[in-house]
Image (spheres, rainbow, N blue to C red):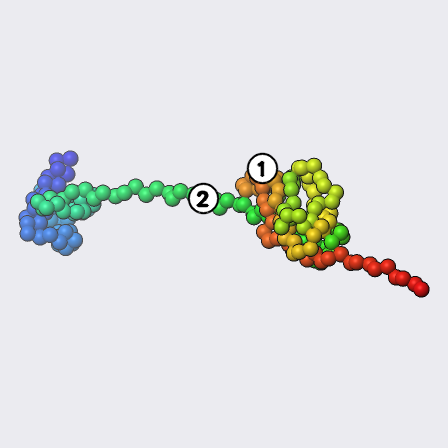
Amino acid sequence: MSDFYSTIWNCGHLIRSKFSGNKDLTSLYNGINPQDCLVSTGRMNPMDKMLKTRIAAGGLIVLISGLLLLSQPSAALSSTREDGASKPTYMPTQTAPPPPTPTPYCPESYIELSVDKSKVRVGEHFILSAIYHNLGQPWVYSVGLNPQGLAVVDPPFDPPCKNCSDFRIKAVSVSRLEIGLCATGEIYCNGWMWSGACSKTPVYVQIDPAKIYLPILLH
């Protein structure tokens, strides 16, 4: 055991003498022979010499590794302050981005209108039909007939007219009739809710004068 400590002691002195002014530790390690650390104790048999050489090599590796650690700059101190001293580099904590906000699914709600006749005479009837898009359980309170007095819903209904899709209308006066329609009902926008919708575009009906029949006089 005394030979072991003596060997380590000799290696320390040897490294200290060679390390002075030499920063290349790799060449320093390659330039030291572990046998130089052996304590001269006279004649040694080959087995003792091999064992002590291995001890010296191990001690040499430990000492060189220590010097390498001491000679390397700290990884945590990478920036320099104004006074020349190192300060720790701030590494922000990376957090996961927030999940994307789902796009609301709200189909357009509207009423599509059509008529079975685009031209009628005073006193005649035509049918107004309504198709409800994204509007469930529609309640109709009135039919928009403009200008007023040109036509009437016949027969009239007591509002609201629930789930009504066809309306019978009678022409009353001569002019061009514009028809629109609104209704309340259930619409879907990320869930069902009670709201309303109107016709996107009106429909038009031309009302002409009624035919006049003259009696035929036979002589």
What crowding class fits label 1: few (fewer than 14 Cα within 10 Å), some (14-19), or many (20 or more)?
A: few
Q: Which of 97/78 is in front?
A: 97
Residue 121 left/right relative to 72: right
Q: Specify which label sits upstream in the sequence, 2 or 1.
A: 2
- What is the crowding at mark 2: few (fewer than 14 residues within 10 Å), some, or many (at least 20)? few
Screen quadrant of the N terminus = top left
Disc 2 is placed on an element classified as loop
Task: Decide: is 174 above or below 135.
Answer: below
Q: Position of residue 119 (x, y in %)?
A: 71, 58
Could you say where residue 148 lies in the image, as x and y percent from the top left? Answer: 64, 48
Residue 122 in view of the camera: yes
Instruction: Please tell me which residue lies in front, 67 or 180.
Output: 180
Q: Is residue 216 left or right of residue 80?
A: right
Q: Position of residue 122 (x, y in %)?
A: 74, 54
Mark 2: which amino acid? Thr
- Picture residue at 49% right of the left edge, 46% below the top: 103
What residue is disc 2 on?
A: 101
SS assignment at label 1: strand
**Residue drawn at 60 percent across, 49 percent down:** 199
Residue 47 can be seen, yes or no: no
Horizontally, is 209 left or right of 111 in the view?
Answer: right
Task: Provide the residue designation for mark 1.
Answer: 194
